């Protein structure tokens, strides 16, 4: 609830399903919106080009209205790469014209490839945008190193994504058929086609598994591949999972897998670990800072299908190893990636920005 007698902060985010929106919704649940009198503006949504243009123009108009009629203390601008980065810069530029501090929060998993695909002029523009921000929040230390290289004067802060741990996680049943869960965008970047190939190889070693795929994206393409490989009894497509339905599958799964080629700090991995699931994932983005290989989960180089297959077989057949990795994963999240650790860090950034603005 916005307090009309206090200055407001503005948070900008996509309305589309995914990790960025999950992070923003988590902030709201933690009471951050009430504490900082935050007005959330959706600048983008899934759908047709007309829908996207409508969302963007509506956001620009409302954003401008707030600057004219409200006292704004800062904006928190959540941005991905490509179109998202350029669109969000329009809002940042408007804020700077009004001398409003800008926090630029980078989520894009392919930020490096986005930067290196630009012309010399485009790279310079990106560096300038990062440098002009009053604070650049990144999701991992590896991202901090990259941003420091391309924008040495940027004011960078590492704030990891986080989850609130479930109050209680029951012991998993002794199932003959081990359930392996994937959550995310269905497509090449998340490694879904590698996972299907790996499942085909795994089925020649054991029949005691089922892979549950929750997500949207290239669903029909992936389903066709599963049908061609005659794996319809081993791979089940669940559609996009959210709310209680997602929690149901996290509670029921035995293993979590995310064979991505590019990531920031994936919310799905954090959620799985909080549910005491042993995880199998790749050594990309901030994942190695979250998952200590062999302690909290098993990591492999993206694209190494044989290793992925070996790790799935290992966890399917070794119950004690599943339990050990799962317990360690939950402790890891509690100690470094929980709301109790991360929210105070974000509050500290907000307080610094407000203090500097008032000087």
Image (spheres, grey):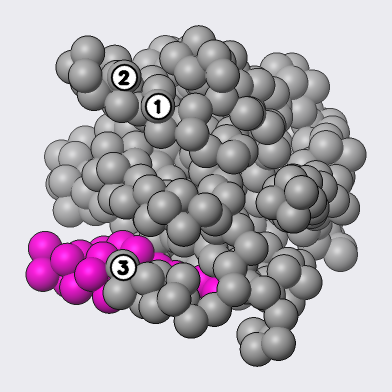
- Which residue is at a point 76% across and 49% down the rendered structure image? 359
Label 3 element class: helix
Which residue in the protein does label 2 denote?
Answer: 124
Q: Name the foreground residue: 188 vs 193.
A: 188
Secondary structure of residue under mark 2: helix
| Region rendered in magenta | 39-58
- Point out residue 252 in the picture as x, y percentages from the top left corner: 65, 59
Q: For residue 184: magenta?
A: no
135 lies above or below 7: above
- Who is closer to the viewer here, 310 or 94? 94
Give 179 or 143, whichever is nearer the viewer: 143
Can residue 99 be seen by looking at this rendering?
yes
Which residue is found at the position 70% from the left and 17% from the top?
A: 293
Is residue 49 toward the left or the right of residue 100 in the image?
Answer: left
The residue to which callout 1 is attached is 128
Asked if the residue under mark 2 is in contact with the one under mark 3, i.e. CB atoms within 8 Å, the reply is no
Name the residue tied to disc 3. Answer: 60
Residue 62's quadrant in the figure?
bottom left
How busy is the neighbourhood of tag 1: few (under 14 within 10 Å), some, or many (20 plus)?
Answer: some
Q: Is residue 122 left or right of residue 345?
A: left
Verify CB contact (< 8 Å) between mark 2 and mark 1: yes
């Amino acid at each position: 609830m916005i307090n009309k007698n206090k200055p407001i902060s503005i948070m900008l985010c996509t309305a589309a399903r995914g990790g960025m929106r999950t992070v923003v919704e988590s902030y709201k649940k933690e009471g951050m919106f009430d504490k900082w009198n935050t007005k959330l503006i959706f600048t983008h949504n899934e759908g047709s080009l007309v829908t996207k243009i409508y969302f963007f123009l509506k956001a620009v108009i409302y954003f401008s209205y707030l600057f004219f009629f409200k006292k704004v203390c800062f904006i928190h601008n959540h941005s991905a790469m490509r179109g998202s980065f350029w669109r969000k810069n329009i809002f940042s530029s408007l804020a700077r014209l009004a001398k409003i501090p800008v926090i630029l929060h980078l989520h894009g998993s392919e930020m490096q490839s986005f930067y290196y695909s630009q012309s010399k002029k485009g790279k310079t523009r990106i560096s300038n945008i990062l440098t002009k921000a009053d604070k650049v929040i990144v999701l991992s230390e590896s991202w901090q190193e990259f941003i420091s290289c391309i924008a040495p004067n940027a004011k960078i802060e590492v704030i990891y994504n986080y989850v609130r741990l479930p109050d209680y996680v029951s012991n998993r049943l002794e199932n003959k058929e081990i359930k392996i869960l994937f959550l995310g965008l269905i497509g090449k970047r998340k490694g879904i086609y590698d996972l299907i190939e790996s499942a085909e190889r795994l089925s020649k070693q054991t029949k005691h598994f089922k892979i549950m795929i929750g997500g949207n994206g290239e669903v029909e393409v992936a389903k066709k591949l599963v049908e061609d490989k005659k794996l319809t009894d081993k791979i089940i497509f669940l559609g996009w999972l959210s709310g209680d339905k997602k929690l149901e599958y996290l509670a029921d799964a035995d293993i979590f897998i995310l064979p991505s080629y590019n990531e920031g700090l994936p919310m799905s991995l954090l959620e799985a670990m909080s549910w005491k699931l042993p995880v199998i994932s790749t050594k990309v983005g901030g994942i190695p800072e979250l998952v200590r290989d062999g302690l909290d989960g098993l990591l492999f180089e993206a694209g190494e299908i044989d290793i992925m297959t070996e790790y799935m077989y290992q966890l399917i057949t070794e119950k004690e190893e599943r339990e050990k990795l799962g317990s360690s994963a939950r402790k890891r999240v509690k100690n470094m990636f929980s709301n109790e650790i991360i929210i105070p860090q974000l509050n500290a950034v907000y307080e610094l920005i407000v203090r500097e603005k008032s000087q």
